[in-house]
Image: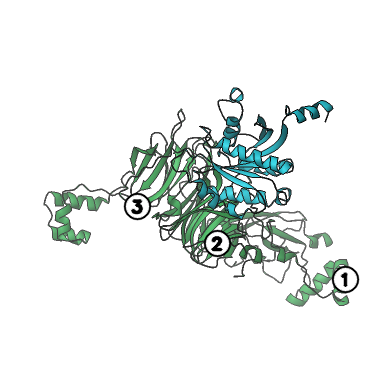
Amino acid sequence: PPSPPREIQNDNEAHSKWLDAHYDPVANVYTFSSCIGKFDSLPSSSHESVLLDLPAGVAAFLMEQHEPRTLAVAVASGPFIYVYKNLRPYFKFTLPLLDINPLEKEVWEQAKEDMIDPLTLKEILGRMDPFVNLHKLQSLKRQTVITCMGTLKKNMVDEDAVSCLVIGTESADILILDPEAFTILAKMALPSVPVFLDVMGQFDVEYRLTVACRNGAIYILRRDSKRPRYCVELSSLPVGLVRVHKSIVAACSDQTLQGYTQKGKKLWSVSLPATPTTLSLMDQKSRGFQAVLVGLANLEVHMYRDKNLVNIIRTQDVVNSICFGRYGREDSTLIMTTKGGGLIIKILKRTAVFDGGDTSPGPPIAQSIKLSVPKKTKLYVDQTLRERENAVGECKARTAGHRGCDCCTPSNLVSVGLFSPLTTAACSPAPQLPPSRYCRVPMLVPGLSYPIETYVECLSNKGISDLIKVFVLREGQSAPLLTAHINMPVSEGLIAA
Amino acid sequence: MGLFDKLAGWLGLKKKEVNVLCLGLDNSGKTTIINKLKPSNAQTQDIVPTIGFSIEKFKTSSLSFTVFDMSGQGRYRNLWEHYYKEGQAIIFVIDSSDKLRMVVAKEELDTLLNHPDIKHRRIPILFFANKMDLRDAVSSVKVSQLLSLENIKDKPWHICASDDLKGEGLQEGVDWLQDQIQAMKT
């Protein structure tokens, strides 16, 4: 990859945009970006509680509408969500059990009543006798665990509105929980286990879930869709997922940072100098500035605004988690924890402005640089002039040269289709050529146009325009993938005749 | 200046007026300190975060102070520089208990000292290492170390440990400021 511009590289201690507020290399904080969050209005008292399992995510949300509005903190761990209010345990939610395999259930039932010997059971289940003897009296259940968690506003966009919890589970499901009753409001199935989750919208109106999964794909779900609407196949496993304005940014383990639209169309991809460790959103509300922060394995944190690198922060250790936001009285605070358990707090300078790279949307500047293309020759100019003045004759001459047919006149070029415009050349009745009804089409990739030409025969000689239906079919399937109707103009051959 | 004013000045009835800027981060106690320096009948009971700035007046034995009490909130800090020209002295207040934001205070101080309106003027700067009553407050020596005050070579400066709620240390600082201003005038 090209090295970053000089002004970004020179961002050393003296000219840094960040103030080093705090660094504790032995803070003993071992966490990940999903388990770190910034919450306002929490009472400042120290409290420690021991979780049974590793936490999978943490989220702060408002549970009920009425006063006093105390922010609740939800910690997902194993199959449970622990809800804390005023930093005191308030409620524990357990994920519902999954359906048990009926065969296994029956076998265990029989083992409980000693109707079946451990050897047969072993054959069915493939397990050991001591295991059977140890567990045969316990009731059979299948439990899943939480892999990621997010919040979704219930019906208002306000900062202090009630939010639902959105959780992803190991059983490849997405559950949306009611904030007050903790009932499951919606359940959606995914093809793989979700690992990163981004939520936007409101539950009662319209929402959109962007989920990065363990199979290296990003799925986009919307309200009332039980299955994913769009799918993005990443080039490798995702390390982080954030949404910046309306685009999705994912850091992948093949040292790339990729941007996609909300419909899963790839916008850009930049290569990173090292493997990313974490990804986080930097949202500076006072300036309306949004960027992504990528922690890298080479002791750097890169800040990207779209595809442009705008800042590099050098750290003392590999950064494991990043969180940007209000901390205490300071609005623009960057909190990072390191692999070695260290804690880094940096404050953005009041005067810091991030500019760098071209921020304009559209193609990069390099594209608009003029190349030294030689001037058009007189021969070329003459030829184009001739073609313009005598288009039909020229074309006839050309097609005759190619096909050995002098009577077909391309009268029209028609664009068909939504995702794969087909180009057909219509012509007057061509007795020599049999009408080719089928065109074999190569693999169609969304977003590209494929010019496909075919000859069309005018069946009636009454000089009326008619309709041609074009079907795009998959081989071996009768249901068309796409249909298009082309209104054919009156054949020029007939008019001429 | 009218004849009567001059006469009053000679006789020591009318005090010399000085403009002072009161700067510092939000929640450092600027307004509370200024409030404590005012005569007890003019003090207000509740102090709210300053919006923009406010102009306060108080008198010492020989001077009449007009204080520009600037808001310390991040979004109003860009107002400070517009008043640098008018200021004949600076009071810089630091929350000694806010160790995390000491770097922010240092940054703002450095920006202040490097501003063209301040850089080449020999104006006195009084630092209040405020909130000494809090348990996790650091000493005034430590504050001066953290802000690298020893690097200020071309301006008279003084740091005072203070407690704005009880008013401790404020008089000492103002006395120093008054001496400096009078020394400058003569």
In the rendered image, is residue A263 in sight?
A: no
Give above or below for B3 relative to B149: above
Residue at numbered disc 3: A54
Earlier in the chain: of badge 2 and badge 3, it is 3
Q: In the displayed structure, would residue A167 be above or below residue A312?
A: above
Q: How is the image coloured?
A: by chain
Residue marked by disc 1: A386
Q: Tell me, what hue is chain B?
A: cyan
Q: What amino acid type is highlighted by mark number 3?
A: Leu
Residue contact at pointers 3 and 1, CB within 8 angstroms: no
Question: Quick one: SS at disc 3?
Answer: loop
Determine the CA span between mark 3 and mark 1.
77 Å
| Crowding at mark 3 (Cα within 10 Å: few <14, some 14-19, many 20+) | few
| Label 2 vs 1, first from the N-terminus | 2
Q: Residues within 10 Å of mark 2 (few under 14, many from 20)?
A: many
The residue beneath circle 2 is: A257
Cα–Cα gap, marks 2 and 1: 50 Å
Residues flagged by tags 3 and 1 on a common chain = yes
Q: Comparing marks 2 and 1, which lies closer to the viewer? A: 2
Contact, mark 2 vs mark 1 (Cβ under 8 Å): no
Which shade is chain A? green
Between disc 3 and disc 1, whose residue precedes? Answer: 3
A3 displayed left or right of A391: left
